[in-house]
Image (spheres, rainbow, N blue to C red):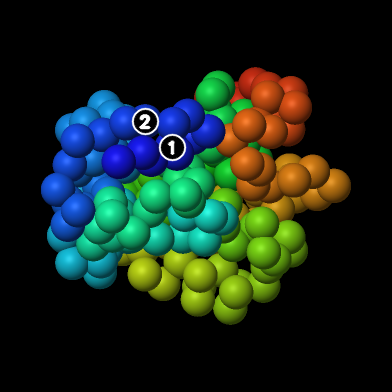
Amino acid sequence: MKLNVNGIEHDIDAPPDMPLLWALRDLIHLTGTKFGCGIAQCGACTVHVDGSPRRACVTPVSTLEGKKILTIEGLSKDGSHPVQRAWAEIDVVQCGYCQSGQIMSAAALLAKIPAPSDTDIDQALSGNICRCGTYPRIRAAVKRAAELGAGHAIAAAPSDLPSMLLPSVTVPARTA
């Protein structure tokens, strides 16, 4: 079967019921998408399928032929996507395990609602659990990403990424 991941066609040999998560990690060797709970409850495995967030741990590969899959690795090649930049600027990450899923959910939200309210953010990311409790920083980073992305496309088809990349920024070291 063929899967279009980050704009690249991959021929994979997998049983039809194999979850996308394992195809990404074990067959395509993209390990940014994390295993958390395996039952679509924690959001660590969030990817985009045709622009919408989807839990890779419960999505069978057989349902994805002809669809475009975007992973954290495809969001930007150099971390210059507005959400990734905001995450670094706000210093969201504590343990970091949930962050690729959080970032993918935030990017999907901002592609749909460029200037989200607190309620929009809370609803869109409610399925992403952060065991470290960095929710205030996550919300601040989504708002900052909205500022950084104002006037720019927040999410793009993988083939459009090089033209959509914003100039890189230097993030000052965080002081205590």
Category of crowding for the residue at label 2, using alpha-carbon neighbours closer than 10 angstroms: few (below 14), some (14–19), many (at least 20): some
Most foreground residue, 18 or 78: 18
Residue at the spot of label 1: 5
Q: Specify the amino acid type for callout 2.
A: His
Residue 23 sits in which quadrant?
A: top left
How far from the left and from the top, in percent, is residue 175? 51, 31
Residue drawn 28% across and 51% down? Answer: 61
Q: Specify the amino acid type for callout 1.
A: Val
Most foreground residue, 90 or 37: 37
- Tell me whether circle 2 and circle 1 mark residues in contact (CB < 8 Å): yes
Residue 14 sits in which quadrant?
A: top left
Give the mark nearer the N terminus: 2 vs 1: 1
Circle 2 SS class: strand
Residue at the spot of label 2: 10
Most foreground residue, 157 or 121: 157
Category of crowding for the residue at label 1, using alpha-carbon neighbours closer than 10 angstroms: few (below 14), some (14–19), many (at least 20): many
Most foreground residue, 56 or 127: 56
Q: Is residue 106 visible?
A: no
How far from the left and from the top, in percent, is residue 176? 46, 35
Q: Is residue 61 visible?
A: yes
Residue drawn 46% across and 66% down? Answer: 125
Is 111 placed left or right of 95 in the picture? right
The quadrant of the image that shows the N terminus is top left
Is 152 placed left or right of 154 in the picture? right
Give the spatial CA distance, label 2 vs label 1. 7 Å
Residue drawn 39% across and 50% down? Answer: 65
Q: Is residue 174 above or below residue 108?
A: above
Residue drawn 25% across and 66% down? Answer: 40
